[in-house]
Image (cartoon, rainbow, N blue to C red):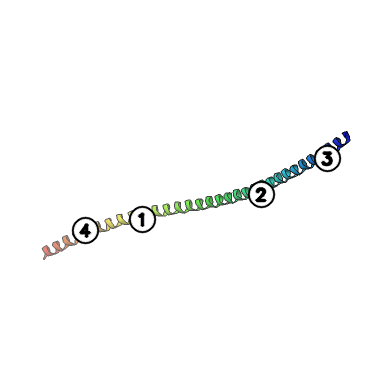
Amino acid sequence: WMIKCMVKLDKERWEVKTHLERKLAEVQNQADDGSVAAESLSEQMNLKIEELNDQLVQERLMRTELEGKLFQLQSEHEIQTGVIKTMETVNANVISEKAELKDCIEQERFNINHLR
């Protein structure tokens, strides 16, 4: 009777041990799958970070280029504004000199007419 009980207990222990080993293997497989998925996700995140960093560098380069163009346009605008002001001054001087010459011509005509 005792031997029978011992055999039965050994059999039950073996079944429990086998069951627990299977469960442990399942859990380890799930853990492995999870760590593979986490590794894959980590790699994808690193690639995305690199992509975003590259994009940021490109955007900074474009911004620097645009700032350079803006400075150039502002300089050209200042030069053109200066040229326009100079031309307005020259134009005003020409109009003034033209009026003076017209007055001189009128005076000379008057003098000539009086001398006759």
**Is label 1 in a helix, a strand or a loop?**
helix
Q: Nearer the viewer, mark 4 or mark 2?
A: 2
> Residue beneath label 4, please?
99
- Give the residue pinned by disc 2: 40
Expressed as whole percent of the image width and height from the top left, the position of residue 45 reads 61, 48
Q: Quadrant of residue 98?
A: bottom left
Q: Nearer the viewer, residue 49 or 111?
A: 49
Rendered position, 24 above or below 62: above
Q: Which mark is residue 11?
A: 3
* Residue 114 rendering spot, x and y as whole percentages: 11, 62
The location of residue 113, given as percent across then percent down, is 12, 64
Looking at marks 3 and 1 on the same chain, the residue that comes earlier in the sequence is marked by 3
Nearest to the eye among marks 1 and 4: give it: 1
Quarter of the image with the N terminus in it: top right
Q: Secondary structure at mark 2?
A: helix
Q: Amino acid at mark 1?
A: Val
Q: Secondary structure at mark 4?
A: helix
Circle nearer the viewer, 3 or 1: 3
Q: Going from the N terminus, do you reach mark 3 or mark 4 first?
A: 3
